[in-house]
Image (cartoon, coloured by chain):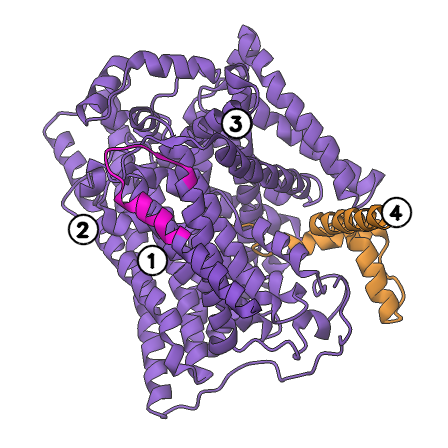
Chain colours: A purple, B orange
Amino acid sequence: MKKVISTFAWIVIAVIGAGALATIALQRNERISATWFVVAAACFYMVAYRFYSAFLAAKLVALDDSRATPAERNDDGRDFVPTNKWVLFGHHFAAIAGPGPLVGPTLAAQFGYLPGTLWLIAGAAFAGCVQDFVILFCSIRRNGKSLGEMARDEVGKRGGFIAQLAVLAILIILLGVVALVVVNALKTSPWATFTLAMTIPIALLMGVYLRYLRPGRVLEASLIGLALVLFVVVAGQWVANSAPWASVFTLSGVALAFWIIAYGFAASALPVWLLLAPRDYLSAFIKAGAIFSLAAGILIVRPEIQMPALTKFIDGSGPVFAGKIFPFCFITIACGAISGFHSLISSGTTPKMIQREGHARLIGYGAMLLESFVGVMAMVAACAMQPGVYFAINSPAGVVGTAPDAVAATISGWGYHLDPQTMVNMAHAVGEQTLFNRAGGAPSLAVGMAQIFSSTIGGDRLMSIWYHFAIMFEALFILTVLDAGTRVGRFMVQEMGGRVWKPFGQTSWMPSVVISSALVVCAWGYFLYQGVIDPFGGINSLWPLFGIANQLLAAVALVVATTILLKMGRLKWIWVTLVPMVWLITITMTASWQKIFSGNPRIGFLSGAKALAAQIAAGKIPAARLTEMQRTIFNLRLDAVVTAVLAAMILVLVVEALLRWTAILTKRSEAVLHETPYAATQWVGGAEGD
Amino acid sequence: MRKLVVSVQNEVHQFWERIREWCGDSSYERYQRAMARKREPLLLSPQQFYVQQLERKYSRPNRCC
């Protein structure tokens, strides 16, 4: 009887989900409610988790709860800590959920709501979750080894080297592009700049409190910090309204870029307890609170989706970024559907804390489903605003101009009516001077969030507070990614340098700390600066580069996963990782080819450089802008080289993997697995934290 | 009724402990318990443990894009 009820319940969930998806996919010329998105995503995730992840756990990898995990084998109370599965789920989710699932879908909304939403939901279930789950499983079975170590052991030395290089490449490009998102959100906004600047002394205060006054009392310090952050969000309005203070905090894009570069250097070189860690605590609490509030807000307000299902920009002529729906929709969404970076978390801290292999299903597969849901909410927030407003905020000056009337005329000409007064009123409502040309996704997401929040609490009166709360939330956790990433990059550079000259590898030797921090900061700082001075807003060239690097790392992870499954004798189920791997390689290679060689100067780096050079040769560029244009030409060529290197890396890895697979399948080489030998668990009645 | 109150109290307490564990508030207590289980002496003071834990945590990728 129970089975009949359960079967019936799952049929009902599947039918409701299919109905909601059909409504989203087939509705034309009529506005639909955001509730359909929430219902479709929730039902799809439930079915995927219940059936597909169960299949992966039972058939593909055969999780074994009788086997001792690394946390049990090496329980040291520090790195290897057996942790309750829900607590570890929270840890893992907090680690994987960054700005990507918020910014990517917001940018991809330029194609309309449909392609991005479908890829977010299906891509997560069949690619992203699979990657996170299988890599987590592989790392658990190898005593918590990292992706790079597994690639070296299971694929080959070159595979390990490529994985390491890919990590460093993605880190540098990621940090440059997310810093650009912050700059575009803060430039000429004294309120937002003041709020974010004040989080630094607040973090320092928390750092001293946690280090000297109440060591390790994270909750107390975070509550104090949260209260202060909320206060500075409100106080930002007073600063913006005071002419002398407003002028201090009104910074240009270039000035902000240099401040952020200086901040990244300081956060990497200073003791971690002083600035980086307390900021991360603040960010984690605000991130969790804002994401749940957004979900609740969408369910309460149930906004209508105003963006069409598909826009005319699927042809590649989009103002936010150039390129056709294939492959650029997938490259742009990146983290909300599948992120290579997650494989570093799945083979980092999480496998060292998991109590039982069976928990990998909830943590590896389930946490990624939740991240995908965050992406769907970001898509809803972006698509709930008028399309004209969305394009006005996200289009760079190089495409639509700067004068409000000209911007409105251009965007209205695309078929998305925009009254310049609407933008003036909106900027006034959110307490900004202007919302035009704020490419990067963060300001439009903040407007969307503020509209949803203010419809729930406070009405129009609180619109400006909610907008700046949303900007602070986005910028705060982007800076957390920035400082934590810079520090990790510093350690990687020190490790590489240590191979050449041993003292450089000492992580606490000050000259090495300073030099390696400076190298990493200069590397991502260069991409940031390039984006800030780019006449097309920077996002057009840098976000696809980031997407390519990210998806490249995901392809590396799936190559490793496929190789391990092959060695485990799972040939029958190899399609589970092989299909997403082939898909990722296809989109990465297509996007790389187009970004390098496309004849359209807005898409291809080389043709973009050629077009600018032709304009200079024809004397069409004023003398005052000659240096800037020459620098832009150099940057475009540099981006082409970086993209080519990324594409070459994936080709080498694929060839290496194919050779290894052929050798295994033709029995020319033995399929040696590098798993830790089986040891039975001693935790019969439950473990620590159970 | 009293049973219900006790049960709710237990749930709230457990939830609170999970939050403490999630944010790292109870890390030192866990370290103490791990050392007690292994019957090894406590080598680190709360301050030392806190700083060392952070040094390890932020020397590898722990925040994603």
Q: SS at mark 1?
A: helix
Q: Name the kind of residue labelled 3 in the image.
A: Phe
Residue placed furthest toward the bottom: A667
Specify whether disc 4 shares its chain with disc 3.
Answer: no
Cα separation, mark 4 vs mark 3, equals: 39 Å
Residue A417 on image: x %, y %: 24, 21
Residue numbers of the magenta segment: A16-35
Residue holding disc 1: A646
- The percent position of residue A78, horizontal first and vertical second, equals 74, 61
In the displayed structure, A298 sits above or below A323; it is above
**Circle 3 sits on which residue?**
A453
User: Looking at the image, which is closer to me, B8 or A262?
Assistant: B8
* Residue at 54% across, 24% down: A466
Please state the chain letter of the residue tagged with numbered disc 3 in the rendered image: A
Q: CA distance from mark 2 to mark 1?
A: 15 Å
Distance of label 3 from label 1 (alpha carbons): 41 Å
